């Protein structure tokens, strides 16, 4: 007759089984969280990559505008300047290659003695109001007497910018920026200002290049001061062009542009655009609210001002994809990641994050 198992042996077997089960459970839990961490890192890396692309594109767009305006400045620095027709032709050529500019403007420095002659030139071009300034109620009126004026003499395109002709920038909101550009001889970018050419309240920024006449003795742009050439932008149009070149159905970027050189909190935020095209851009989140969760931030120096491009957001528009794809939320960073789960040939379960470049097929 066989002997019954000893209690100690049975207990040892049970302990071994429990230990094996625990090891398996711990291994499964560890594998799950390890996979989630790798997915999170992959998603965050993709997010940072796309944010860097957006920043690089924004910097490239501003560089193009700056170079284009510099080319116009060189044309105006020639002895004798350019005619209204030549200015319009050059500006149109630049605008065709650099869409998004509200208008190009030529602002000569005019002495009190030269005012009648320049006002006559404005009248011959169909603008009989002469030099204008904005009064305390925000209405345009004839400019008062002073030693020097900065009137807007040429504007291209003229259509839609009629109110700008003759406006004396010497008394405008960008007078300090003009003085800085004249003093430094460098391109200057203004803070947000109300555009005088707009019937409705519209914010804009202005790129300003000072123009110095070129002479045989002093060389290019080193002679006497002649005035300013400007590129006027509506803030929304300027920065929307950046978003439109990077948006796609599965893009993950919400955008916030901030003028970090602006001390007035009410004028720091330049532009906010949620990635979801159906989402309202209002109300605009403040800077701290926008930085909740995962975000990426870059600085951009333009015309002496420091702008920040901040990107945040989630993967969107995933539900239309094929069966077998899920969306997973990473609570730590509040980011939604589209995931494809699959089994490798060796039986190992794995997953991969998807974006708009992924080609999903059923075979």
Image (cartoon, grey):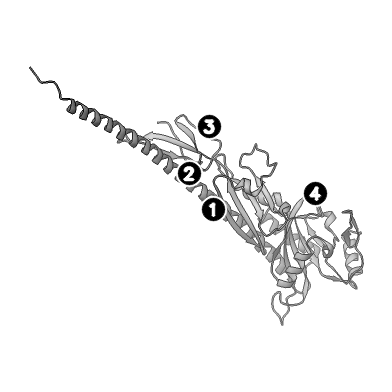
Of residue 318 and residue 66, the one placed in the foreground of this image is 318
| Residue 80: x %, y % from top left | 79, 73
Q: Which circle's residue, 1 or 4, is located before the other in the chain?
A: 1
Label 3 crowd bin: few (<14), some (14–19), many (20+), radius 10 Å: few
Mark identifier at residue 319: 3
Q: Quick one: SS at disc 4?
A: loop
- Residue found farthest to the front: 7
Quadrant housing residue 114: bottom right
Q: Which circle's residue, 3 or 1, is located before the other in the chain?
A: 1
Mark identifier at residue 52: 1
Q: Which circle's residue, 4 or 2, is located before the other in the chain?
A: 2
Q: Quick one: SS at disc 3?
A: loop
Which residue is tagged 2? 43
**Quarter containing the N terminus:** top left
Mark identifier at residue 201: 4
Give the CA distance from mark 1 to mark 4: 33 Å
- Eye-nearest disc, 3 or 2: 2
Give the CA distance from mark 3 to mark 2: 18 Å
- Say whether residue 244 is visible: no
Residue beneath the point at 63% across and 61% down: 301
């Amino acid at each position: 007759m066989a002997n019954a198992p000893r209690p100690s042996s049975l207990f040892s077997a049970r302990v071994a089984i429990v230990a094996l089960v625990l090891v398996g459970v711990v291994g499964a839990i560890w594998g799950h969280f390890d996979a989630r961490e790798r997915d999170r890192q992959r998603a965050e890396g993709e997010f940072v990559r796309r944010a860097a692309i957006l920043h690089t594109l924004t910097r490239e767009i501003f560089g193009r505008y700056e170079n284009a305006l510099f080319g116009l400045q060189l044309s105006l620095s020639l002895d004798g300047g350019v005619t209204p027709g030549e200015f319009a032709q050059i500006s149109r050529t630049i605008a065709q290659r650099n869409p998004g500019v509200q208008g190009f403007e030529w602002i000569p420095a005019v002495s009190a003695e030269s005012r009648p002659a320049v006002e006559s030139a404005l009248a011959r071009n169909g603008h009989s109001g002469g030099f204008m300034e904005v009064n305390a109620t925000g209405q345009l009126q004839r400019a008062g007497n002073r030693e020097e004026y900065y009137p807007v003499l040429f504007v291209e395109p003229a259509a839609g910018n009629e109110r700008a002709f003759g406006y004396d920038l010497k008394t405008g909101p960008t007078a300090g920026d003009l003085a800085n550009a004249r003093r430094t001889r460098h391109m200057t970018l203004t803070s947000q200002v109300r555009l005088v050419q707009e019937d409705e309240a519209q914010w804009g920024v202005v790129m300003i290049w000072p123009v110095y006449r070129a002479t045989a003795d002093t060389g290019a742009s080193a002679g006497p001061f002649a005035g300013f050439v400007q590129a006027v932008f509506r803030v929304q149009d300027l920065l929307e062009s950046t978003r439109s070149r990077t948006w796609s159905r599965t893009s993950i970027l919400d955008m916030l542009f901030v003028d970090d050189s602006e001390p007035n909190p009410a004028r720091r935020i330049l532009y906010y655009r949620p990635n979801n095209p159906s989402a309202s851009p209002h109300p605009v989140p403040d800077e701290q609210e926008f930085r909740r969760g995962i975000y990426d931030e870059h600085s951009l120096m333009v015309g002496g001002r420091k702008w920040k491009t901040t990107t945040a957001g989630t993967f969107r528009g995933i539900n239309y994809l094929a069966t077998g794809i899920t969306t997973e939320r990473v609570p730590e960073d509040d980011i939604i990641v589209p995931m494809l789960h699959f089994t490798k040939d060796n039986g190992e379960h794995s997953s991969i994050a998807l974006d708009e470049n992924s080609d999903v097929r059923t075979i």
